[in-house]
Amino acid sequence: MTKFHEIKEGVFVFHCPGCNEIHIVDSRWTFNENVNTPTISPSLLVRYRHPKGHSNKNPAPLGYSGEYVEEVCHSFIKDGAIQFLPDCTHKMAGTTVDIPDFETLHPDWKDL
């Protein structure tokens, strides 16, 4: 089982347990090419906006014009673990956890 999943040559995805979303790693990062114990450099900074009170599982209605929330996920990935930095806006900020197995969480992605 692997922590990083290659979706096309040189482009990998992994499941972030802090955001509970998929993040992408491509040629902008140096990667040790080990999908079981990945290490990348430099840090991974993901910023995204979403309608307040809504998510991918609870989408905002078409034409939503309400308030938006800014989210930040900032981490170091080393030897298959994610060190979430203090500027993360999710509950795992300041912790270090193993990257979960991608295929277990996303079995439908195995053929991509």
Image: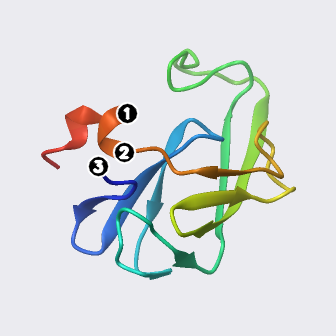
Circle 2 SS class: helix
Looking at the image, is mark 3 or mark 1 nearer the viewer? 3
Residue 22, compared with residue 107, is above or below; it is below
> Gap in Å between the C-alphas at discs 3 and 2?
7 Å
| Residue depicted at 78% across the width and 50% down the height | 95
Which residue is at the front of the view, 97 or 76? 97
As shown in the figure, which amino acid type bears the numbered disc 2? Phe
Which residue is at the front of the view, 13 or 4? 4
Residue 100, compared with residue 56, is above or below; it is below
Circle 3 SS class: loop
Instruction: Decide if residue 42 is on the left or right side of residue 13.
Output: right
> Gap in Å between the C-alphas at discs 3 and 1?
11 Å
From the image, tell me which residue sits under label 3: 1
From the image, tell me which residue sits under label 2: 102
As shown in the figure, which amino acid type bears the numbered disc 3? Met
User: Percent position (x, y) of residue 41?
Assistant: 58, 81
Q: Are marks 3 and 2 in contact (CB under 8 Å)?
A: yes
User: Percent position (x, y) of residue 91?
Assistant: 79, 36
